[in-house]
Image (spheres, helix red, strand yellow):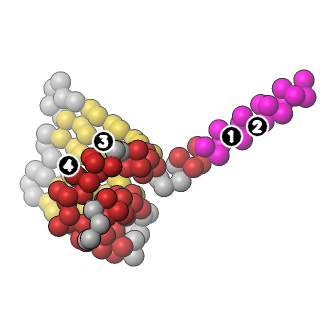
Amino acid sequence: MLLIAKAALGVTAAVALTTAYVFHEGVIRVDVDESRSGGSHVHVWVPATAVSAGLRLTPRHHLQEAAAQVRPYLPLLRELSKELQKYPNAEFVDVRDSEDHVLITMREGKLSIDVVSDSEKVHVALPVETIADVADRLEDAAPGI
């Protein structure tokens, strides 16, 4: 009986540590709701660690192709991720008209993009560390930048 209790404790600890590691970078959230009848409602929450893992598992030649395509923008992406970390809670863009509203903010270290119109609502939240990690991986795949 004691052996079963020790095994259960070990499994519980392993699951807790794995969960903590997977979610330590935060969560990427994408919510899309269409207001029309029969409209789609898509809600995706993915651990940001999945992006890092995906970039590590992507075949090198595919990563090099992607890096070649975004090469002119990599320095901008790198600086953007550094500068956004300086503003953990800030409002960058707030545009309204009679039908639409676009809001781009930093909330608790996440870049948040909210678009609300008569026909749909789109909300995206992305940890800044994920942007920096993507820039790092692409720069590693495209040396000379």
Dots 1 and 2: beta carbons under 8 Å? yes
Was residue 45 drawn as part of the magenta stretch in this picture?
Answer: no
Residue 4 falls within the magenta-colored stretch: yes
Residue that mark 2 sits on: 10
Residue depicted at 13% across the width and 43% down the height: 118
User: What residue lies at 34% left-to-right and 68% top-to-bottom?
Assistant: 81
Which part of the image, by quadrant, shows the C terminus?
bottom left
Q: Nearer the viewer, mark 3 or mark 4?
A: 3
For marks 3 and 2, give the one nearer the viewer. 2
SS of the residue under disc 1: helix
Question: In the rendered structure, which amino acid carries the disc numbered 3?
Answer: Asp
Residue name at image x 78 percent, y 36 percent: 9
Instruction: Point out the stretch of residues depicted in magenta.
Output: 1-18
Is residue 78 visible in the rendered structure shown here? yes
Which of disc 4 and disc 3 is earlier in sequence?
Answer: 3
Dot 3 crowding, Cα within 10 Å, few <14, some 14–19, many 20+: some
Give the alpha-carbon distance from disc 3 to disc 4, as whole Å. Answer: 11 Å
Residue 31 is tagged as 3
**Nearest-to-viewer mark from 2 and 4:** 2
Mark 2 vs 4, N-terminal side: 2
Which secondary structure, mark 4?
strand
Q: Which mark is residue 14?
A: 1
